[in-house]
Amino acid sequence: MKGKVKYVTRNVWYAGNAADQYSSDIHDVRFTTTNAILYDGKEVVIDEDDIKSYYDRSRITDKLVNTISESLHNVWINYSEDNDGVYHLDGNLEDYL
């Protein structure tokens, strides 16, 4: 499939750590995903390891997400849907920058 990027955003959420439920010191696990939002409303996941590798970073900051968003704005990308109905970027990030 193919779509045009409107902007890029990053989602952060926390989920309970079921492995340590017996412990009195339970901390939620942090999850993140970076998504390209297309003009048709679909969200396409961009591999965060790809982002870190391309920009030679160990962390993804809000400033970096804004940089990626500016670079990908109005760029046509190819993506595919997995068995869970989640869309993923085809190829590497550098193919589109």
Image (cartoon, grey):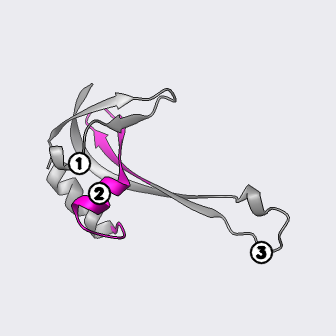
Q: Is residue 30 left or right of residue 4?
A: right
Task: Give the residues drawn in magenta, as a range.
Answer: 33-61
Residue 78 visible in image? yes
First reached walking from the N terminus: tag 2 or tag 3: 3
Q: Is residue 23 left or right of residue 87?
A: right
Residue 73 visible in image? no
Is residue 34 one of those drawn in magenta? yes
Mark 3 neighbour class, 10 Å CA radius: few under 14, some 14 to 19, many 20 or more: few
Residues at badges 1 and 3 in contact (C-beta under 8 Å)?
no
What residue is pinned by disc 3? 25
Residues at badges 1 and 2 in contact (C-beta under 8 Å)?
yes
- The total number of labels drawn is 3
Q: Which quadrant: the N terminus? A: top left
Three-letter code, disc 1: Leu
What residue is pinned by disc 2? 51
Residues at badges 2 and 3 in contact (C-beta under 8 Å)?
no
Observer-nearest residue: 1 or 39? 1
Please tell me in which quadrant of the rendered image residue 89 appears: top left
Three-letter code, disc 2: Ile
Compared to residue 78, the image places residue 32 above or below, namely: below
Observer-nearest residue: 53 or 31? 53
Give the structural element (helix, strand or loop) at label 1: helix
Compared to residue 53, the image places residue 93 above or below, namely: above
What residue is pinned by disc 1? 93
Is residue 51 one of those drawn in magenta? yes
Report x, y in % for residue 88: 36, 37
Report x, y in % for residue 87: 39, 34
Give the structural element (helix, strand or loop) at label 2: helix
Please tell me in which quadrant of the rendered image residue 63 appears: bottom left
| Marks 1/2: CA–CA distance | 7 Å
Q: Residue at x 37, y 39 (%)?
A: 43
Three-letter code, disc 3: Asp
